[in-house]
Amino acid sequence: MKVVAASDRAALSGLLDGAWTAPAGVVTEVTQILDGVRGRGDAAIVEYARRFDDETFDRSKLRVPIPMADGARALVSPEVASGLELAKERIERFHRRQRQPDVAYVEEDGTRYSFARTPLRSVAVYASRTQAAAAVLTAAVPAKIAGVSRIIVLTPPAPGGVLPAVLFACTLCGVDELYAVGGVQAVGAAAFGSDSIVRVEKIVGRGGMRTTEAKRQVYGRCGIDTFAGATELFVIADDGANSEYVVGELLAAAELPGVRRLGVLSESRPLLEAVGQLIDTLDVRTVERNEFVGEAIAEHCRLIEVSDRDELFDLVNRLAPAYCSLQVRDPSRYVERIYAAGAIFVGDMTPVASEYLAGVSSVVPTAGSARFASALSLSDFTRTFSIVENSVERTANDAASIAALAEFDGLPHHAQTARMRFGS
């Protein structure tokens, strides 16, 4: 695999598109499925489930009972159960520290101000087949901490209903409702509702291209977290980095379906060449799910040589990756200059797979949207609003200025609401 210069914009064109876009055919297909769910509800959900997931699917399989904790734990191996329990504990610790008190204060003239936070009433967590149980934990746990009163999980059908680990994760988090429905039809059911599923206020969770496009199309009908689609990763490495660790991170990202952006950024050409040689000699047939690994590495990975750190930071912030792996000697000096990334994993001893147990969110913005969007956090499960209560003194003092500004904007009735309170 060859090394390209950061200045070679032609070589990097596929990486720098910088916006969520789906092919026209996908947009049309998603629109048709959403229209079907909105118009025909359960009947459409069952039709699409039979087409995409399970030929024998019927309405009786849509709602999945959530078992008691002991019964659900027995469905998975002790090692997996312990891992999910540890992950839940760390997610709770990380997100409880994000809670902030409401703001309330009184000015000297008696005017009262408040900034209040209230939990959303209902949230749908979408958990695709890939890392489904972890997806439930990373969204449902902070939703519970925020005080959301109704949490539903939507996940594609599997033999016997849904994946056993998803059942266990739902019991751990206290999920209220679980449905065996995936893809675009799941997003439509959450946004529009159906005979069996009551619509929600917000949809969160990571999915593939069609699911992410569906979230884009229903935004406004309900809230969404971010464009959390396929995984993407850029490794920033210096001349002291371990090339095997670097390639290991690329392989890990590449084994997830739908990945479209992978790369290594470095000032060290020898390091990039060493990484390229490892990739060229790699036998992807020895890697599980090699159909994803081989395609992603060959088609979507770039080894990028930067001339200096200024060029490096300019490029990485333009790329705005979902995941950034920092394999450098002085990571703190890098972290302070990276402002557009969904999640940063620092140092040789922090594989991105640490996400399983780190407690941080796995729902991060993709396709360069980290420039303006953020990873899922506790604030995604609350709404905020301001409260103003003027004192008589405040309105008396401000009335003339309010009226002048409103008149300037051509809004005489706005102006009158201030004047009328004092008989003018």
Image (spheres, helix red, strand yellow):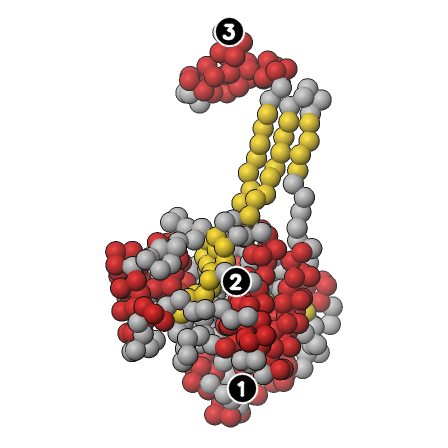
Name the quadrant containing residue 309.
bottom right
Classify 377 as above or below 171.
above
Q: Which is in the foreground here, disc 1 or disc 3?
A: 3
Identify the residue under disc 1.
Answer: 279
Marker disc for residue 423? 3
Q: Nearer the viewer, residue 242 or 155?
A: 155
Which badge, 1 or 3, is on the more N-terminal residue?
A: 1
| Residue 305 visible in the snapshot | no
Which badge, 2 or 1, is on the more N-terminal residue?
A: 2
Identify the residue under disc 2.
Answer: 175
**What percent of the width, then of the height, locates residue 100?**
67, 47
Q: Nearer the viewer, residue 421 or 86?
A: 86
Callout 1, which amino acid?
Answer: Ile
Classify 213 as above or below 162.
above
Q: Residue at x 41, y 20 (%)?
A: 410
- Whole-angstrom CA distance, mark 2 to mark 3, is 56 Å
Classify 94 as above or below 422.
below
